[in-house]
Image (cartoon, helix red, strand yellow):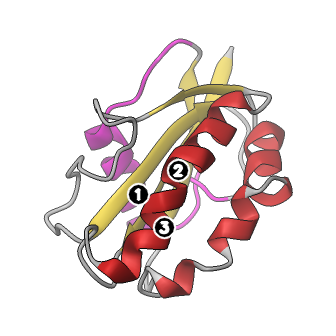
Amino acid sequence: MYHLAQLNIARLLQPIDHPQIKDFVDNLDRINELAEQSDGFVWRLKDETGNATAISVFNDPLIIVNMSVWESIPHLKSFVYDSNHKEIMRKRRNWFEKPTEPHMVLWWVVAGHIPSPEEAKQMLLHLTRHGPTKRAFTFQQVFPPL
């Protein structure tokens, strides 16, 4: 059995403690709780504060990551596009630079495997270099588990 892992990154317009980013930070706990209570949620990357904003995966302090594992593509899609998550992300231009390269990647993991941030980074780099493949893909071009 396989689960779906996802990584998405965003580059902040200002440091995380800047007043311009406050609305985003103020909604983090609510949106993270919504994810954890969503059907099909398995796991998400977080530190002792309950989020992943301080976890450095890329060599840029303004890049923040969100990483999670879901039971299936429909479960993740439902959270992303059909929940209150989409409302908060409508404001993303207030907090994040517009991406110029792939910023989200999906990949299959064996159920029970918790991917590391380095594994996720490698999947995003693979997607960036090769486009969607069976190894690393996007919602626009999905592949079945290997």
**Along the viewing direction, whichever of 78 and 108 lies nearer the viewer:** 78
Does any portion of residue 146 appear in the rendered image?
no
The answer to which of marks 2 and 1 sits earlier in the sequence is: 1
Q: Residues within 10 Å of mark 1 (few under 14, many from 20)?
A: many
Which segment did they paint magenta? 112-138
Residue where numbered disc 3 is placed: 24
**Along the viewing direction, whichever of 64 and 7 lies nearer the viewer:** 64
Residue 143 % position (x, y)? 71, 46
The secondary element bearing badge 2 is classed as loop
Residue 40 % position (x, y)? 75, 27
Q: Residues within 10 Å of mark 2 (few under 14, many from 20)?
A: many
Quadrant of the snapshot with the C terminus: top right
Q: Is residue 116 above or below residue 117?
A: above
Residue where numbered disc 1 is placed: 124
Residue 78 % position (x, y)? 83, 47
Residue 67 % position (x, y)? 46, 44
